[in-house]
Structures are given as C-alpha cells and as structure tokens.
Image: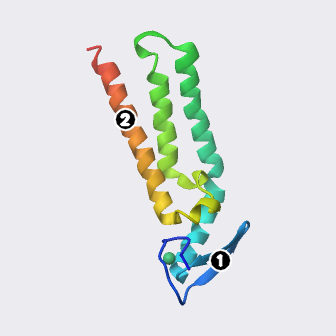
C-alpha cells in the first residue's frame, strides 16, 4: 500500500480514509489527520483562490487589450504575482484525488507552492526591469 499523504510504501499498519470520491490508504494516524485538514482547507479556501486567479487573469486582459507602450505588460506581471500568491497560499484547487495516486499530497502541495513562488520572483524581476529601464 502507498500512503496518499506522504507517499510512503508500507505493508502493514496504516488505515484508510474515506472521501467523497473514494477510499485511500494512509500509513498512520498523523497522515490521516493531515488529509482531513487538507480537505477542510480545500473547502474553506477554494473560492478565495478562484477569485485571486480571476484577478490575475484580468491583468492579462488589461495588458493585451487596454495598455500599450512601455508599461503594457505591467498589469500582466501584477496579475502573475496575484496568481502566484494564490498558488503559494492556497495550493489546494490545483490538485485532485485522482492525481494523488501518482503524487502524494505532501509532494504535490510543495511543488505547487514552489511553482507559485517562482512565478512571483520572475514577475518581480520583469517589473524591476520594466521600471529600472526608465530611470
Ligand atoms: Zn503517510
């Protein structure tokens, strides 16, 4: 069996956790608790993260259709920062239990947060270049 949370392979002990779309193996009670917390946060923050991603995409639209010239891409970079923040703060929506069979929750969670962090850093770098070039 493989733990859906930490990804550890185990042969005995462990238990199962029931969620809406199936039953999954967990290696210990601690992992079981983490999965429960995860699902709770998922429910709690889903709307917030959607709103942030939505705001982020407005940046893309502004850059594409409204802004022009030197600062054309600034709204897009700001939008990317917001979307990156959403990934770092609320990585929940980008995962589903289907993918957990391949990627344990803990790993997927970390990967999404790192990706979000990278997006923020890259956007800040582009912003700095945009404004730095003018001075
Ligand atoms: Zn585990």
Q: Which residue is mark 2?
A: 122
Coordinates of residue 54 in the picture (x, y in percent): 61, 35
For residue 81, above or below residue 86:
above
**Which label's residue is closer to the chain start, 1 or 2?**
1
Q: Residue at x 45, y 28 (%)?
A: 77
The residue most toward the top is 69
Query: From what the image shows, is residue 41 above or below residue 121?
Result: below
> Looking at the image, which residue is at 47% across and 41% down?
84
Q: Quadrant of residue 66?
A: top right
List x then y, in percent, for residue 121.
36, 39
Q: In the orientation shown, which residue stands out farthest toward the left?
A: 135
Residue 71 falls in image quadrant: top left
In the picture provided, is 73 more to the left or to the right than 44?
Answer: left
Q: How far is mark 1 from mark 2, CA to CA?
A: 39 Å
Q: Secondary structure at mark 2?
A: helix
Given residues 64 and 124, the one toward you in this image is 64
Query: Label 1 belongs to which residue?
Result: 17
Instruction: From the viewer's side, name the closer residue of 98 and 106.
Output: 98
Q: Ligand 1 closer than 8 Å to the CB at disc 2?
A: no
Category of crowding for the residue at label 2, using alpha-carbon neighbours closer than 10 angstroms: few (below 14), some (14–19), many (at least 20): some
* Residue 61, percent from left and from top: 58, 23
Q: Which secondary structure, mark 1?
A: strand
**Residue drawn at point x = 47 percent, y = 44 percent:** 85
């Amino acid at each position: 069996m493989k733990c859906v949370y930490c990804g550890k392979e185990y042969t005995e002990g462990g238990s199962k956790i029931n969620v809406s779309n199936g039953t999954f193996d967990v290696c210990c009670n601690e992992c079981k608790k983490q999965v429960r917390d995860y699902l709770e946060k998922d429910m709690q923050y889903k709307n917030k993260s959607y709103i942030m991603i939505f705001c982020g995409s407005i940046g893309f639209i502004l850059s594409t259709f409204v802004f022009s010239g030197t600062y054309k891409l600034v709204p897009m970079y700001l939008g990317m920062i917001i979307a990156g923040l959403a990934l770092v703060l609320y990585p929940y929506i980008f995962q589903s239990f289907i993918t957990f069979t391949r990627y344990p929750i803990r790993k997927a969670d970390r990967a999404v947060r790192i990706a979000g962090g990278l997006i923020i850093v890259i956007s800040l770098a582009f912003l700095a270049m945009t404004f730095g070039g003018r001075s």
